Amino acid sequence: MKNIVSIAALSWRYLWSRPLAAALNLLLLTLGLAAITLVLQVSTQIDQAFERDVQGIDLVVGAKGSPLQLILAGVFHIDVPPGNIALADFEALRSNPQVAQAIPLSLGDSFAGYRIVGTTPEYPAHYQATIAEGAMWQAPMQAVLGATVARAMAQGSPSAPPGGPLVGRQFVGSHGLAGGGHEHGDHPYTVAGVLAPCGCVLDRLVLTSTESVWQVHETAQADDPEDLAVLREEREVTLALVRYRTPLAAVTLPRYINANTPMQAAAPAIEITRLVRLLGVGADVLRALGGVLLGVAALSVFIALWNAVRERRADLAMLRMLGAPPARVGSLLLCEALWLALLASLLGLAAGHALTAVVGQLLQAQNAMPVSGAVWLPQEWTVPALAAGVAAVAALVPAVQAYRVDVAQLLSQP
């Protein structure tokens, strides 16, 4: 143990005897590991969010258009829907014998950038959401806030000043899904409850009854009783989240909907696979960049250690004369490289998590997928292992050269 400590201490001093070279090698290793950590963090968290939000949803049915757009709008709420579907078509879909459950979603308004979703209590129950404060809505124009929305409202917004309890507070929705649209000032919502954080899409939503959405938009478009009656007869929902009754429905129901109804059916599993493939291109580019940086770092470490052996021949000969075995002399070079790997691992992981936090802030500003830099993934243990492997490979030839140093030849040189 004493020998190991002395080798580690001596190699540390050797490492920083050339501070510029050590700093350059450390920077290259850190950048490569940070890029790999960033890709690992973001891709894993987004994949987990995809799997969590889409779980239990077999089919998304909405207006005809892009299937991927339908999935992004209806499941993840990060895109605009292609349109609405007639309430009568939705009721026919829900009564289909192949459908076990059809949850309606009505979109169109938002609050402080967070979407207001008209639906039924089946929607929060699907994600096993629980009430942290207050209760579920019981009447039109009552709303339940997701955890992220509640936090934003508690901190204050243009429509709701900070302070005071959330339950019972009133707020006004604005037209459009991105915020900043015309406010429906004549139809304020009353907060009935707040959902406990679930780590799912509900955290970023304001939930209310479908009747609330109809009431807001019908009275905004007409005030004449006859016109209101016409609008009630033409009521629509945006889309439906469907769960199959039998596995056979996966084969027949989408084809039937697409061919025989004015609606479109999109299978989340197929569209998410396509989306992940598209996102994977960017992840592969970042991963390749990290690999290139690690390769350059390995070459730089190799050159630095090779030159170090040539510069330290007298020191190495002295160590051999003092009784140090060849293995201990060679381990000095290996330990020096491992010091670099350890420092680069710590800095690379820290930088990767910091970059992930920045990405998370950017996504949060768009009310998109939640990504956090405070999450530790089990896969991240591969980062220090990768750094140690790169350093060991780079130090292998210089370490063997130091191991084979000829003391008599060195001492005979003038």
Image (spheres, rainbow, N blue to C red):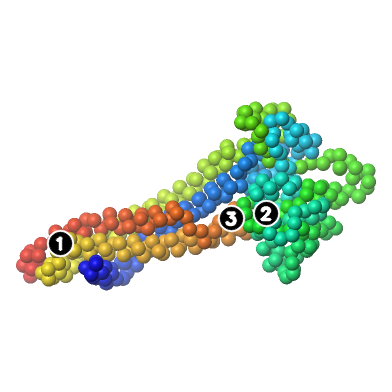
Give the percent coordinates (x, y) of residue 143.
76, 55
Which numbered disc, 2 or 1, marks the residue that appears first in the sequence?
2
- Quarter of the picture holding the N terminus: bottom left
Quickly name the residue at label 3: 370
The image's mark for residue 360 is none
Which numbered disc, 1 or 3, marks the residue that appears first in the sequence?
1
Quickly name the residue at label 1: 326
Give the percent coordinates (x, y) of residue 98.
69, 30
Mark 3 residue type: Pro
- Look at discs 3 and 2 and give the one toward the viewer: 2
Give the percent coordinates (x, y) of residue 72.
63, 45
Quickly name the residue at label 2: 130
How far apart are labels 1 and 3 at the CA level?
Answer: 54 Å
Give the left or right position of residue 19, taking residue 157 as reference: left
How far apart are labels 3 and 2 at the CA level?
Answer: 19 Å
Number of callouts: 3
